[in-house]
Amino acid sequence: MTLWGGRFSEPTDDDLRRLNDSLPYDRRMALQDIAGSIAYARALEAAGVLTADEASQIVAALQNIRGEFETETFVYRPGDEDIHTAVERRLVELVGPAGGKLHTGRSRNDQVATDFRLWVIDAIDRISGHVEQLQVALTGQAEAHLHTVMPGYTHLQPAQPITAGHWLMSYFWMLARDRERLADARRRTAVSPLGAGALAGTPLDIDRAALAQALNFPSCSQNSLDAVADRDFAAELLFALSLLGVHLSRFAEDVILYSNPAFGFITLSDRYSTGSSLMPQKRNADPMELTRGKAGRLIGRLTGLLTTLKGLPSGYNKDLQEDKEAVFDAVDTVTAILPVITAIVTTLQLNPERMRAALSDDMLATDLADYLVRKGLPFRQAHHVVGQAVREAAERGIGLAQLPLETLTALSPLFEADVVDVFDFDVSVSRRKAAGGTAPKAVAAQIEAARDWLERHRT
Ligand code: ARG
């Protein structure tokens, strides 16, 4: 028997049942469903709908059912349409008709919204913990490479020397914002829809605020129609995960490039590299390519849910059932990637000599212009003079540092013998010591700020 069979004279078509059922995936919310029902039973008792005896019986049975889920002994039956009907069916089996009173004033509409919010809150906490681990790993590697100088790129063209610690820490802050976004989404998710009923609210004398508290929601929804109809919290989570995925994807791209022998800046540990079945020499960064690829999947889940929500009339619509697979898949995806990336970062070998070998004098052109600025030339003119010097060097097929002093002084009389001091990559990075710069000193301060941030955002 279905929960809603009363008005029908024929059983549901089998194909429709398969299409309609959400049990295959929403069974993941079993524990949340039980927690919601236990709190609701107590609220019904307080409202005088259930006697103390009935409430205790129902709660005890629900605890039993929870045990069945925990020990994986819960038996699903053919009529179980979703996790809510499965639990209620089992409840009636255990306590008899009194079990049927639990759904008084409740709809699966406020029930599913409650369960799903509880599940999402849990997922956010777990994911934030994984991201935290990655932040810790990045900070550790950055600290070990405060003085390692590497080429920094813009447009993927050699730009200026930076320190490897600085490169690694750039991702720390992206992840920090991702965790802030998750925390922010969590705040808006932690609003209890329970007691909203199907759409219009409950006629029962239920203390919704107390009910919310019992489920660790700091507050309850202000509008029953909104409470059952919107899935903005799910969309927000999907956005936060998509952007996290985009950040991880960009990091993955760096790792793929830098581990390419043409760069050779880093080496992935054997444990996290893959080979080719045909080419014996191959050493691929598959986990990083998967990370890059899965960002597309995360964005797809976000786009899919937004498209589902767009144009829905107010109130609950069955389209909303699409929310769960999207969120479960996105959560599973980032949960699968994050520990692998963290391990890769922890075991990553940086090759400082390869990084240094990739530095070219050209990358000090800005420093050369800064030299002229220190001697009083306006930057715009200095830029032009150095541009001419770069061209001169290129035409002669030599590096900028190899240009004879006379050639430089011909371009500007401000050049003097001390210009040789400019051509030092370590000096170049150490000059950028203002807050947020690439100098080892500034990066050390950055790492201290990062540790402070981690301290304030412990999961
Ligand atoms: N399985 C449904 C969902 O995920 C539960 C809510 C069903 N409500 C309804 N009025 N049919 O959305």
Image (spheres, rainbow, N blue to C red):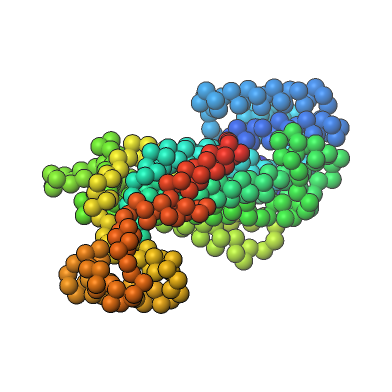
Residue under the image location 27 percent in, 51 percent down: 356
Residue 47 sits in which quadrant? top right
Q: Please report the residue visible at 25 percent of the width from the left and 37 percent of the height from the top.
A: 270
Which quadrant of the rendered structure holds the N terminus? top right
Q: Position of residue 454 (x, y in %)?
A: 55, 39
Residue at (28%, 72%) from the top-left corner? 408
Which image quadrant is residue 69 in?
A: top right
Give whichever of 177, 447 is nearer the camera.
447
Q: How far across and down, in percent of the image, does residue 298 sit?
A: 46, 53
For the C terminus, give its image quadrant. top right
- When the figure is inspected, residue 423 is found, relative to residue 389, above or below; the finding is above
Q: Is residue 354 visible?
A: yes
The answer, for residue 86, to whether it is visible in the render is no
| Location of residue 253 (image quadrant) | bottom left
Residue under the point 82% across and 30% down: 45
Q: Nearer the viewer, residue 443 or 86?
A: 443
Q: Is residue 204 left or right of residue 357?
A: right
442 left or right, relative to 254 = right
Q: Position of residue 91 (x, y in %)?
A: 66, 29
Q: Is residue 10 above or below residue 372?
A: above
Apparent side of residue 248 relative to residue 225 in the rendered image (left or right)? left
**For this rendering, which residue is in front, 402 or 10?**
402
